[in-house]
Amino acid sequence: MSDKGKVKLSRRDFLRTLGLGVGAAAVGIAAKPLGGTTLAANPNFEARHFSDPAGRPNRPWWVKTVDQPTIEIDWAKMKRYNEGYKADLGTGTVRGGGFEAYVGKEKSDELNAISATTLKDGILNNVPGYTLKDQALKGAQDAGRVGMSFVGPQKAKTPEEKGVPKWTGSPEEGSRILRAAFRHMGAATVGFVELNENTKKLIYSFDPDGKELIFTNDLEPSETETQRLIPNTAKSVLVYTIQMSEETLKRAPTPLGQQTTGLAYKRHTVVQAAMQEFLRGMGYMGMGSASINALGIAPAFGVLAGLGEMSRLNRMITPEFGPMVRCFIILTDMPVAFDKPIDAGVMEFCKRCKKCAEACATGALSFDDEPSWETRGPWNNPGHKAYFEDSTKCMTYWREVGTNCGICFSVCPFAKKDKAWIHEWVKATASTAPVMDGFMRSMDDAFGYGAQKDCEEWWQLDLPEYGTDSSGMIW
Ligand code: SF4
Ligand code: SF4
């Protein structure tokens, strides 16, 4: 991931290359309506009221609301998928027992041994990113999670227990209240999807622990030794993202890079438990993930809620934070106003960019020009058009380096945390002039974006909380 040999251009050089000059931000960009602001993020934070009755945020002008997502979905072909590997079905993700089933126990054991040796040698030899402090940070993220459960902690007093009626109001009010609460708890972006006969197919059939997720006519959610029961009255999917730190993910693949996702998952456990209790306090149910990667295909709900678009990563990319988010869901019977998908030009940009596929050391990502209906293996869920990945290649690499990876996320041109002009130009161009996408990708390379950063340097940085920047939300 060295940037050796790459052409380094200054912003001024870049503008001159385009023949635009430094003041060229006005060319077809700043002139566009931006909800009253310029393309540059407002650096001066101040509290302001939601401008939308449902609390939908102002977004850049190039984020368009559309009726259908920018990937095609064939709901008739879509089936509920099991996250945990099911030997009788021969399907499931590579997490859990899936990887071993797909590559064989011998290969899996061999890779596990390599992984353990790599991690131990990293400490003993003080390998940057693998040192004791890096691995202690990673361990702390995983150990620091609060308990997760399907029905939540169930400690907050319900309206009934307080002797008062439950909250009632319009769906728009419900959305606004939930958005405010979610953001306050630590979510980056929030959207809402109706749970209907189609979208129920995005709820897993089996959770990672093997429990079956079943829709019922029961009035309350419940759980047995083998099942989790979801009342059909739960018609709202609350979808939210948690930001990941670009500063540490740009130091992947190392334990220092790995704890980026660990921190996002840890924060999710806190947000989920708190929001389940908030819903309880309002008089409604809140069903969450009983473990990491449980309950449903959260990024798919994120796409339907307009939080982002699907991409060549076969993951969601948001306009505000690129791929630097993790996505989660909670199911409830509280009425909310549903959101629509978006077209921000991401999928179009991906068709010409391919930077993530080139950066992947194992060729796990698709180089196809167009997304396809054809899956790459039983770890993919059919029924939608996508750039399907070879998850066994990806997971093999994870074991070889002893950590998860995320290089593909960190090199993505949409992953810039700063609000520099080039970043906005790339993103704005992607949604308006696809012909420029290849050129903008080249410029992204030329600026040296995506190069892996120095791991030891990270321990010297004075960063904001969680190493993230929320100004991407201010437009
Ligand atoms: S996480 Fe790493 S190995 Fe997996 S697809 Fe991305 S770049 Fe490739
Ligand atoms: S690196 Fe390029 S192709 Fe890959 S997800 Fe990002 S924009 Fe799409």
Image (tube, helix red, strand yellow):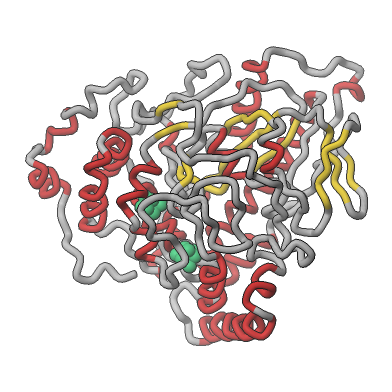
Residue in the foreground of this view, choosing between 109 and 248: 109
Residue in the foreground of this view, choosing between 35 and 435: 435
Rendered residue at 18%/32% (across/down) = 25
Left or right for 144, reference 421 = right
Residue 103 to residue 408: above or below? below
Residue 442 to residue 104: above or below? above
Residue in the foreground of this view, choosing between 289 and 262: 289
Residue 101 to residue 186: above or below? below
Left or right for 434, reference 372 = left
Q: Quadrant of residue 333?
A: top right
Q: Quadrant of the C terminus?
A: top left
Residue 324 point in image, percent of width and height? 47, 49
Rendered residue at 11%/43% (across/down) = 18
Rendered residue at 89%/54% (across/down) = 226
Residue 367 to residue 68: above or below? below
Q: Quadrant of the N terminus?
A: bottom left
Residue 249 point in image, percent of width and height? 46, 59
Residue 210 appears in view: yes
Residue in the foreground of this view, choosing between 155 and 215: 215
Residue 473 point in image, percent of width and height? 44, 33
Left or right for 342, reference 369 = right
Residue 178 point in image, percent of width and height? 65, 27
